[in-house]
Structures are given as C-alpha cells and as structure tokens.
Amino acid sequence: VQLQASGGGLVQAGGSLRLSCASSGSSFVPYVMGWFRQAPGKEREFVAAIRLASTTYYADSVKGRFTISRDNRKVFLQMNSLKPEDTAVYYCAAKNSGRRLTSKYEYDYWGQGTLVTVSS
C-alpha cells in the first residue's frame, strides 16, 4: 500500500490549505486514515483521524479549524485559520486497527509528507 500526499505550500496566517492523500497499490481500504505533522526539532504529532464510517478525531490544537474527510481510499484535510505554529511537514497515515488512533506507533502505512508553511 502506498500513500501519496499533496497540497502543501506557503500561506499567510489566517489563510487556508487543503491537503489530499490517496492510497494505492492494492484493493485494501484502510479502516482508519489520519494526518500527523512534524515541525522542525519536534516529534511527529497527531492532527486528525477518520474511521471508515466517518467518525472523526482531532487534536485539541486544531479543533474548530481543521476538518478531516475521506472518500473511500482518499483522505483530505481542510485547514482554515492557519497559524504560524501549524508550520510542519504533514504526513498521511493508514491502519486497519480502530484502536489508539492518536498514536503514531499504531499506523502501518505512511505517505512521504507535504510541507505546510504559514507565514506571520
């Protein structure tokens, strides 16, 4: 299974971006798809996740600003009201287990990352 993320870029604070991630390589439909991010010098952290039945989960830092959605084997992250502290490389991830959605150690498949830079 391969995950391909896209949609990153440079945006001013208060602006919006939409990230996309598509899974390919087999007929496998991930039960959970999610987004993580890693800022320079920091650990990779959970951003949002969505189950196949569309139940969503968000980190407190992005609630009310980011929206995760999916279309079968694609997952999207709509990011609004972006802040400079949202600057990071964003990774999409997928797994079959429905447990521990916020733990990066539980995800089996990872995309290559897409850089989001928010200027002040």
Image: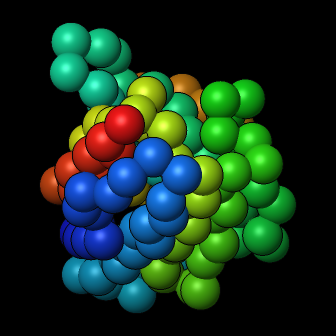
**Nearest the eye: 21 or 1:** 21
**Relative to 2, is 14 above or below?**
above
Query: In which quadrant of the rendered image does the N terminus lie?
Result: bottom left
Could you tell me residue 25's position as x and y percent?
A: 24, 81
**Nearest the eye: 91 or 67:** 67
Task: Give the tally of numbered discs.
Answer: 0
Q: Judge from the rendering whether residue 110 lies leftward or rightward of residue 112; answer left or right.
A: right
**Relative to 43, is 72 above or below?**
below
Q: How is the image coloured?
A: rainbow
Please report the residue visible at 21 percent of the width from the left and 12 percent of the height from the top: 41
Could you tell me residue 84's position as x and y percent?
A: 40, 34
Q: Judge from the rendering whether residue 10 lies leftward or rightward of residue 69; answer left or right.
A: left
Residue 31 lies in what quarter of the image?
A: bottom right
Res. 97 visible in picture:
no
**Nearest the eye: 83 or 111:** 83
Res. 16 visible in picture:
yes
Q: Residue reaching furthest front?
A: 120
Query: In which quadrant of the rendered image does the C terminus lie?
Result: top left
Could you tell me residue 18's position as x and y percent?
A: 46, 71
Could you tell me residue 35's position as x and y percent?
A: 47, 50
Please report the residue visible at 29 percent of the width from the left and 82 percent of the height from the top: 24
Please report the residue visible at 36 percent of the width from the left and 78 percent of the height from the top: 22
